[in-house]
Amino acid sequence: MLDSIFEPGVTGVSPFAIIISLYLAYYVHNDARNQNNPRALLWAFATFMAWIIFFPLYWYKNMRGRRQ
């Protein structure tokens, strides 16, 4: 059962990778919207399509200088 999560599906991408991409895009969109970023949807779409590039880029550009 768990083996099928990691195997490529009909689209050639594993369901696990799609779930990770969706989660990261959701996180980026909510964070960007909370920070009043006018390009929140663009950041989310870019993160979904190529999260390995855009998630660290978003993190670097938008998380620097934030205080907890």
Image (tube, grey):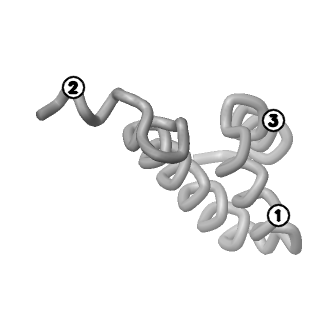
Q: Earlier in the sequence, mark 3 or mark 2?
A: 2
Q: Position of residue 60 (x, y in %)?
A: 79, 34
Circle 2 SS class: helix
Residue located at (42% from left, 48% from top): 19
Asked which quadrant contains residue 41, the reply is bottom right
Image point (52%, 54%), residue name: 22
Q: Which-is-in-front pick, marks 2 and 1?
A: 2
Residue at point 28%, 35% (across, down): 5
Quadrant housing the N terminus: top left
Labels 2 & 1 near each other (Cβ < 8 A): no
Q: In the rendering, which numbered label is found on residue 19?
A: none
Q: Which mark is residue 42?
A: 1
Question: Could you tell me how far apart the alpha carbons at marks 2 and 1 are, in whole angstroms?
Answer: 33 Å
Which residue is at the front of the view, 36 or 43? Answer: 43
Q: CA distance from mark 1 to mark 3?
A: 13 Å
State the mark number for residue 3: 2
